[in-house]
Amino acid sequence: MTLTAIDWAVIIGYFVVVLAIGMAFYRRAGTSVDHYFLSGRSLPWWLAGTSMVATTFAADTPLAVAGIVARDGIAGNWIWWNAALGSTLAVFFFARLWRRAGILTDVEFAELRYTGRPAAFLRGFRALYLGLPINFLIMGWVNLAMAKILLVTMGWDRLTAVLISLAFTGVYSSVSGLWGVVVGDLVQFILAMGGTIALAWFALRLPAVGGIAGLRESLPDSTFQFMPTIGGDTSTAETFALPVAAFIAFVGVQWWASWYPGQEASGGGYVAQRMMSAKDERHSLLATLWFTIAHYCIRPWPWILVGLASIVLYPSVADREAAYVMVLRDHLPVGWRGLLLGAFFAAYMSTIGTQLNWGCSYVINDFYRRFVRADADERHYIRAARLTTLLLMALGGVTTFYLESIRQAWEFILESGAGIGLVLILRWYWWRVNAWSEVTALVAPAIGFAYLNLFTEVAFPSTLFYLVTWTTICWLVVTFLTPPEPTDHLIAFYRRVRPGGPGWARIARAAGDPPPEAIGSLVVDWMAGWVLVYSTLFGIGALLFQSLSAALPYAACATAAALLLHHHLTKRGWKSVTG
């Protein structure tokens, strides 16, 4: 692809703006570790929520979704659409609790909830496990996607693409701290969404595609189904087809049982980081709700449209993920090519910037300051954080050269953490969970995953049944074979965080406090939340591919759910949030 002076001017202009944002927040980020990693806990909901969705909008996601659509039709997206059940759970059950906890990272929660050496071990182990190998894997697949984009569009080899992309992002992230990252995320999200919408617009206008009507004529009707084929003869189905057991694994197990960055049912990782960065509990909840709606309902449709167009334009291409970029390369006019490349750089940088800041927070706050150097001043930790950010950048780049498929990395993350999700949920709502419960839930799926891969032929997603069952049995057995946390520590945690539900009734009685708040209304809010999300998601799809009348029932359901949520939140005194 040949870039003109106009294209290069657009790309360079984007980098100048991002670097200016990073430098503008250099001094603020350097005032304290709290500012560097949590923005001084002062983010408004719209900025925190947009930062969440920008982070999950990486360079890999449009490519991966295009590949899924080409292989399995629109319904193939259930591999990640199922996680909306967990995301809405995080909105209503966990967003306020994370903000109320008053900690710096979600890993630090280990020593807030548990005590003694097991808690310290858990904190240190999770800090290094998530901050290093898991973080490297995530950055690796995001780098891989950016490398594919630059290979197809610019002809760059993987080494050149990774070095140039990472170098700029690493410098920008190390100097700006979380404030610079989230403000940059806002700019990057606007650019990335605008760019992908423009690409979908141009792709549909191509004579070979012929708009939505042309897609419907060129592709089987099954490609446009929103739900997979369940059961029956799945070997001959034309679209995403699953045995009944596999569909249950997606919809009934994966969303709560597996750990996946940005889609944790308990709101961990960088989502928890943004929750804890919000101004207050209301801003934390609204930020997570906005993120969930934008993440599942708004972002994917431009990617899906381009993925469908790429099937028509490049029917014989083997790498369906790269076909998305080929549409950009071959069919965009002058100026728009530069904008789209800038949009992909924006999507890439928003994710890598967060991964670097988030992973660094674990290494510095939960390992280095906790176990290595506990008595240094704030300036020392800021210097260490900036140096660590650059080191993580380099090691994440190395990981890229060991990956070949984005989907492959996705499935590995889901399987290697299968079963831990239930512990991460129940540790907030059941007093009996202890540090050894969580340690066991971290180790057991790795053992089960290795066994299934070495000695069986069970494939994803059916592996989830075995892994979740195995992990759940292991951590429950260990929980009841080990003593609970000391009562005085549990009382202190309960009074600080105030989790609701019957799981803390015993501790409330021991403390002489009123019974925990009932969680029935939260269950209703959660159900209304996922009705809102799925109705909005499929309503937009129906409007695009079917008709206005087909979209109206979805709109009615979404409106009813939104009104119910507004009523409940207002009844609790959470009126409109400003700022």
Image (spheres, helix red, strand yellow):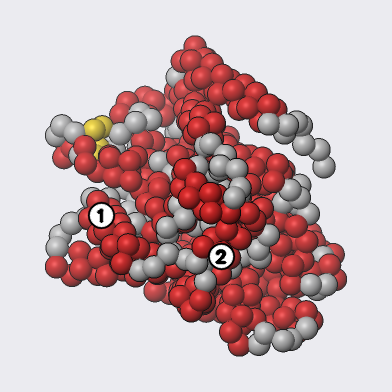
Q: Residues within 10 Å of mark 1 (few under 14, many from 20)?
A: some
Q: Amino acid at mark 2?
A: His
Residue 373 percent across, percent down from the top left:
66, 87
Residue 336 percent across, percent down from the top left:
66, 46
Q: In the image shown, does 138 or 124 lie closer to the viewer? A: 124
Which of the two discs, 2 and 1, sits closer to the camera?
2
Q: Which mark is residue 304?
A: none
**The residue positioned farthest toward the top in the image shown:** 549
Quick check: 570 left or right of 269? right
Answer above or below: position of 364 versus 499: below
Residue 191 percent across, percent down from the top left:
68, 48
Q: Whole-Å distance between the Cαs marked 2 and 1?
A: 30 Å
Mark toward the start of the polypeptide (2 vs 1):
1
Asked whether the viewer can see residue 443, the reply is yes
Quick check: 183 left or right of 448? right
Q: Residue at x 63, y 27 (%)?
A: 568
Among the 4 quarters of the image, the one containing residue 244: top left
Answer above or below: position of 301 versus 345: above
Q: Residue at x 59, y 75 (%)?
A: 366
Q: Residue at x 74, y 78 (%)?
A: 382
Task: Quarter of the image for the N terminus: give it.
Answer: bottom right
Residue highlighted by disc 1: 469
Q: Secondary structure at mark 2?
A: helix
Q: Residue at x 40, y 41 (%)?
A: 82
Q: Which mark is residue 489?
A: 2
Quick check: 473 left or right of 10? left
Q: Secondary structure at mark 1?
A: helix
